[in-house]
Image (tube, grey):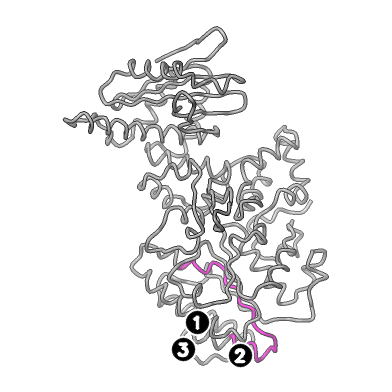
Amino acid sequence: MKKLPIGIQSFEDLRSNDYLYVDKTADIYRLVTSSKVVFLSRPRRFGKSLLVSTLEELYTSNQSLFEGLHIYDKWDWTQRYPVIRIDWAGIKHDSKDEMERDMSDYLQSIATVNDIILTRQFASGRFVELIELLHRKEGNKVVVLIDEYDKPILDAIGKPEAAEIRAFLQGFYVVLKATDDHLKFVFMTGVTKVAKVSIFSALNSLKDISLSEQFSSICGYTQEELERDFSEYIDNTAVRLGMTREDLLAKIRKWYDGYTWDGKTSVYNPFSTLPFFDNKEFSDYWFATGTPTFVINRLKKHGLAKTVLEPVIADSSAFDSYDPDALDDVPLLFQAGYLTVKNKEMINGEPEYTLGVPNQEVRVSLMKHLLSAYTQYPVDQLGVLGKTMLKQILAFDAKGFTNNMRIMFADVPYTLKPSKAKKPAKAEAKNLANEAFYHNIFQMWMTMLGFNIQSERMTNRGRIDAVLQQEGVAIVVELKYHATTELETLLNQAIAQIREKRYYEPFLDRKVILLGIAFSGKDVGCRIEQLSESGFSGLKD
């Protein structure tokens, strides 16, 4: 059984040391034979660096590494091309001056290895010089591979030096247009397609394959690849977890599959899949590798919980460019990997995208961090508290559930105060706003627990606040908030509304639980009832 390539970004290391490799060279061959200047956007830790490394070994004709792969008998191994590979993760970029010095030194190091003397002073000039001299010296045109081209821009967001850093990159990348006659192939990766960096306008032949159906699986693992290449790991993990192979595959798919860029081809994130097979337990491996504070604070500040709770519709303009001076939320979440394409339709000849959270790992982790941001409850304790509260619902333990609701909301900033508005209309508006606040928090919590939520579901009798569904059970929820009305009255209203409007009728093929939750000012109560053939049995707090 081959070793899992956890953290391996070098194709040479991976192939030379018997690591498992999912063969992507069919995609690579199609890529290099159909385009000259290419850009690919993918979220962090999605295999971009390994792809760049593979291209480097291919163009330097390291034939032995490709034996047994799709591309092996299709490539002309007699041709070796000079390669300039730039990875911004390894080049200092905290300021324009630092970038200038470190990039100049890096280009000089490549020149020294190739017995080339550079005479120009600045990095952009040295870049031009290095490309031209490598071409003349080697005879074959130059391949330029740039990994994480946007890292200096993203790392500088909100900093005073951001504009200078972008200006440096603009001058550096435009070199690729000036040296076009000396270039064989250019490949750039990044998380974002950044506006105000001239490469996307200056390079007329640049091909952005980020949303291309043709290259939708060039990074990540398809279902077929997972079941074929990880077959032994799947069997071993199934035994370890006491599951059938089929049940395990279904759960792995729910947790880690779901990333799509064309609305058709779905892939697994390698950085989630590999640690899962190594540890043989479900966890938020990819999400935990990056601090989500920026995204979480933005979602909370802009009241954007619904953006990650429900599908979002966007047109292609949302992905055309990314302006770091005016961050748009949907492109930010999409390019960072928190939203993905769930469906693509052509409307009047133009694409329309439906975006959603890719899988259970991202959904649960987002909800956990977002819920912590709203309630101030420690994120590392929310999972345990949430599972306890779920057990209390299923056991009709209204008292225990209410006590834990009070614990969860104890540290909510005291901004939800009883309305003192003199006009009834303003008081009612405040009540509705506060009810929506608590409804969002409740929805985040249930999403975190893995429920399939239908929020504000319409029926022929009215609109249900939420329906929470797991296998064999449906929880019909009605939530009430009022600044001054007593909890008992609000709970009576909540349960009565579910009964009178028969919100439970679509779910009679399974166990149905009615859950009324009420907030009176800052106090909370609940009532839990089970629907039965003979009527209702219920408990209340």
Indicate which disc residue 133 carries: 2
* Residue to which mark 3 is pinned: 121
Closer to the camera in the image, 73 or 57? 73
Quarter where residue 42 is shown:
bottom right
Task: Compute the Cα span from label 1 to label 2.
Answer: 16 Å
- Against 204, is 317 above or below? above
Closer to the camera in the image, 402 or 38? 38
What secondary structure is marked by label 3? loop
Badge 3 density bin: few <14, some 14–19, many ≥20, Cα 10 Å? few
Q: How many marks?
A: 3
Quarter where residue 482 is shown:
top left
Precedes in sequence: disc 3 or disc 1: 1
Closer to the camera in the image, 437 or 286? 437
* Residue to which mark 1 is pinned: 104
* Span highlighted in magenta in the image: 131-152
Describe residue 181's horizontal placement relative to residue 154 as left or right. right
Foreground: disc 1 or disc 2: 2
Precedes in sequence: disc 2 or disc 3: 3
Precedes in sequence: disc 1 or disc 2: 1
Describe residue 105's horizontal placement relative to residue 481 as left or right. right
Task: Compute the Cα span from label 3 to label 1.
Answer: 8 Å
- The residue type indicated by label 1 comes to Ser
- Which residue shows up at 68% across the image and 70% down it? 55
| Rendering coords of residue 339 (x, y %) | 52, 50
Describe residue 248's horizontal placement relative to residue 394 as left or right. right
Task: Please state, as top left, top right, bottom left or bottom right, where the C terminus lies in the image.
Answer: top left
- The residue type indicated by label 3 comes to Gln
